[in-house]
Image (tube, coloured by chain):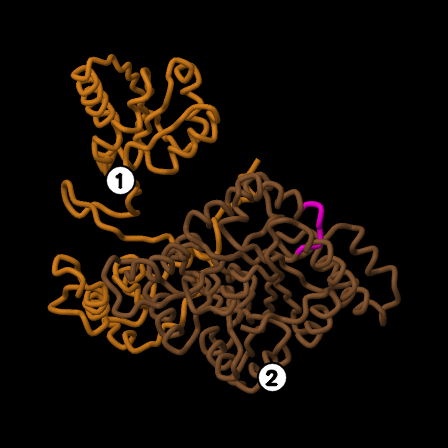
Chain colours: A orange, B brown
Amino acid sequence: MITAVRKPMEEIIACVSPYDRILLVGCNECVSVCSAGGRKEVALLSSALQMHFLKQGKTMEAREMTLERQCDPEYVEELVNSIDGADAVLSMACGCGVQTIAARFREKPVFPAVNTTFMGASERQGVWSERCQGCGDCVLGITGGICPIARCSKRLLNGPCGGSTKGKCEIDANVDCAWQLIWDRLKALGLEKRIEDVIEAKDWRTSRDGGPRKIIREDLAS
Amino acid sequence: MKTESRLEKVLASGALAVTSECGPPRGALPEKVKEKAGMLRGWVDAINVTDNQTAMVRMSSWAAGILIKQIGLDPVLQMVTRDRNRLAIQADIIGAYSLGINTMLCLSGDHPKFGDHPMAANVHDIDSVQLIQMVVKMRDEGKFQGGKDIDHPPKMFVGAAANPFADPFELRVMRLAKKVKAGVDFIQTQCIYNLDKFETWMDGVRQRGLHEKVYILAGITPMKTAGMARYMKNRVPGMDVPDAVVKRMESVPKEQQPEEGIRIAVESIQRLKEVAGVAGFHIMAIEWEEKVPEIVEKAGLLPRPEL
């Protein structure tokens, strides 16, 4: 999923304080799963903002809406009837959702209430870790199902580096060494020999380096 | 004077400055650098050394710059943010300055897609405006970008590029203003073929008084052939070659086209000399360095000031 964390209150307050009526829009997808911007978080932020402004002697009208998927124009269209009643939109979706709203309602200010963080997986209740950088040319098949691009701090393809200590990364003892994990997994699979295969320099064109990316499925595109 | 840069001295003297450029070789050929740069001796005030131009690997700009320095000429070290992060850039600036290079040009660089390593990751840790800020901070505050003091800071005369012809046109003056705000000392513009549009841009520059805060060197590239004119018009992003210029190149027989290209360059310089705020010319004769003296002479830019 795409993970996110809510921005600090002061930053959110600074964005919306010039307005009297805001439309607070959540998303039922990833940010809901990682408890950053779903229905519940929208309600919490809404009351927190109203309380803050009430203390300042200002009435802030905050209308709440949580869309099924904010990155999908079809669902963003559901805002049509509420948008005119708002001076600004505060989105709790990832950057994709914020931009879908901005593209649909060109003359309405839109602010992000969360920082979109990474593509990750849930480790346990309340803990998410980065797992994928969307490089566009997956190497998991040769690295034992553990991604060195997302999980090695130097994104080495022929690791580990000399900084690997007791399974941990040199940058932080709380960070696993991705190449230790890869090695352990290759051993479990009986593929130890693979560690000596030299992985050639990567073609980064499929990643962000090749410019903004787009997928066009001729069989589906209208 | 902020620096020891010869270019700064020429510009400060009020004379029209002349710079040119030298693309380093695609191999370990130091003599080639000296030969190309040597052709420009006495004709220009400083020589830009391109940094992996068009995203093709070449001898590093600082190494080629030092070779040029060794033969007693003044290099302008071009640096792109595509290939190095802020650590490498600052290290190279200190290294280059330690070996006598005191003038540089801050660029973001062409995207790797256009070169022969399209599969390369691009760095872009910082952009060209931030690079200007960084070099100025190193010089004026004696601090690294990260905030720590530099023991003997490098004193660079800082340049940047401006393209008056890119879209949206209404942003072109503002973008220059931003580079001025970042502290840039001089600007070398994109090659100018659409003189009317350049003059419109300069009007905007003067309205904001930017010409009093930064030296603007107008970019001139002589065209060798009508084919080159068509290529520049149709294939080079951000280049504005009016139809009239292409037609003029096409109107003469092939063997006379180089001469016509030189004539256009000379006429452009003569007209642009009259534009208030133009502080000099940057003559980019791509793989045609031997023609720079002729252009400089015919355009009445001689003698170059002795300093």
| Proximity of marks 2 and 1: CB atoms separated by less than 8 Å | no
Q: How many neighbours does mark 2 have within 10 angstroms: few (below 14), some (14-19), or many (20 or more)? A: few
- Tell me: residue B204, above or below residue B88: above
Judge left or right: residue A14 versus residue B1: left
- Tell me: residue B68, above or below residue B225: below
> Quadrant of the rendered structure where residue B115 is?
bottom right
Q: Give residue A24's position: percent from left, percent from top.
A: 31, 23
Asked whether the residues under marks 2 and 1 belong to the same chain, the reply is no
Residue A132 vs residue B156, the one in the foreground: B156
Residue B145 vs residue A44, the one in the foreground: B145
- Which residue lies at the image location 38% right of the left edge and 60% below the top edge? B135
The chain letter under disc 2 is: B
Q: Which residue is mark 1?
A: A4
The disc label shown at residue B35, or none: 2
Q: Give residue A111's position: percent from left, percent from top.
A: 35, 30
Q: Quadrant of the N terminus of chain A?
A: top left
| Residues shaded magenta | B192-197
- Which residue lies at the image location 55% right of the left edge and 70% below the top edge? B46
- Which residue lies at the image location 60% right of the left edge and 62% below the top edge? B15
> Quadrant of the rendered structure where residue A29 is?
top left
Does the magenta-highlighted stretch encompass residue A138?
Answer: no
Determine the secondary structure under disc 1. Answer: strand
- Which residue lies at the image location 29% right of the left edge and 62% below the top edge? B142
The chain letter under disc 1 is: A
Name the amino acid, label 2.
Glu
Judge left or right: residue B200 versus residue B135: right
Tally of numbered discs: 2
Q: How many neighbours does mark 1 have within 10 angstroms: few (below 14), some (14-19), or many (20 or more)? A: many
Q: Give residue A200's position: percent from left, percent from top.
A: 40, 72
